Image: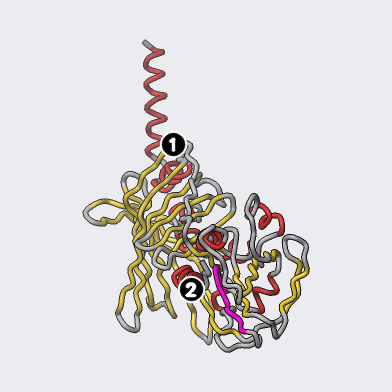
Amino acid sequence: MKKITSIFLLLLTVSCLYAQVPDLEKAKRKYFQANVISYKTTAYYPNPDTDELSVINVLYTIYKPQNKDFEFYSKDESSEEFYKYGLYHAVKHAEKTIYEYEKRDNQNSAISTSRLRQFGPTTLLKKKWKFIDETVIDGKSHTHYSNIESINHYEGKEIKVEFHIYISGNFTLNKFERKSFVNGKLGQTVTFLFSNYIFSDKITNLKVVLPKNYALKYFERQDSLHPLAKNTKAPAFEAVDMKRQKISFKEKNAKQTLLLFSSTNCGYSKAITDYLLSSDFNLNPKVEMINIFGSDSQAAVTRYFVNKEVKFPVIADQKNLEKQYGINGYPILFLINADGFISETMEGTTEIFPFLKSLNSK
């Protein structure tokens, strides 16, 4: 009897101790013991000057949320994001384009300052919080915590930023607010609502499924580089192609020249390559072609064309040429006349395919 009583008292003590654990700690356990978390974020960004409200809806799936550099997938109405093995891809379906970062440092900086990494539930839960009160949201009780994120002084004014989170009765972080104050007066309040949570204990790996027929662009080049326009003088160059032949593109040539800039990771580039190498295509003899894979290594391009009969010079590992011609994505095609001036500049399969077909001598 004494033994049973002792066990009962022990269980009661454990139960009481658990009941005394703050909701915040229980929420941390729930999030960081899961292997996969899926949820919806609805972000509200008000503009105090115009009274307009921008609303952003994104679906997220986070893998191994306890890791600082966790992998993730996101989806909104027109785009998707994949981050796996330290590589980030953004798929813009409206543009039929896959975006990447050319430099890893730029990628890491962008991810660390993204909404997910700054204001996602797992990031917020790792901060230090002060209990404020119990409050009701949509008829349900929530525990309210706050955190002074920063206090700065500018031109004699104090600018303070406060973070506020709200934990529901089932220990999920349902609401986040970022409040900014100028000399104690509330300025802007940005609100994030988190909903549709799914917590899974199963060990599941993120599958990266990128469209095979999309163009490829680099984020860094969009503002700094633009393809050379029609009637621009084409830069001359010398290089060595895949067959170790010296290729010399001069200011003046006997024939018109096509310069095709491609990437081994670009679906549109592959579609064009397949057409150029097919039995259905034979380039007009009055035109020459040079295919440039400026950002790809010699080894990667060699693998790309393995067991294929290449009908034109192919040049790899020439980023300097891409910069000279303003290449910010792939594929891009230039038609250069015999005097060395660009007659046409074309981007993407919609423009390039019809033009190539017009040059087909078959």
The amino acid sitting under disc 2 is: Ser
Q: Position of 157 compared to 54: left or right?
A: right
Local SS, label 2 = helix
Image quarter where the N terminus lies is: top left
Q: Residue furthest top?
A: 1
Quarter residue 187 falls in? bottom left
Nearest the viewer among 104 and 115 is 104
Crowding at mark 2 (Cα within 10 Å: few <14, some 14-19, many 20+): few
Local SS, label 1 = loop
Q: Position of residue 67 (x, y in %)?
A: 55, 47
Q: CA distance from mark 1 to mark 2?
A: 57 Å
Task: Please provide the residue range marked out in magenta.
Answer: 328-337
Does 295 appear in magenta? no
Q: Position of residue 38 (x, y in %)?
A: 39, 48
Q: Is residue 262 visible?
A: yes
Q: Is residue 212 above or below residue 221?
A: above
Circle 2 residue: 358
The amino acid sitting under disc 1 is: Asp
Q: Is residue 129 above or below residue 261?
A: above
Q: Are marks 1 and 2 in contact (CB under 8 Å)?
A: no
Q: Is residue 136 above or below residue 335?
A: above
Q: How is the image coloured?
A: secondary structure
Q: Residue at x 42, y 24 (%)?
A: 10
Judged by its main secondary structure, the magenta piece is strand
Name the N-terminal-most of marks 1 and 2: 1
Circle 1 residue: 201
Q: Residue furthest front?
A: 362
Of labels 1 and 2, the one closer to you: 2
Does 335 appear in magenta? yes
Q: Residue at x 31, y 74 (%)?
A: 53
Q: Residue at x 69, y 82 (%)?
A: 253
Q: Position of residue 149 (x, y in %)?
A: 49, 66
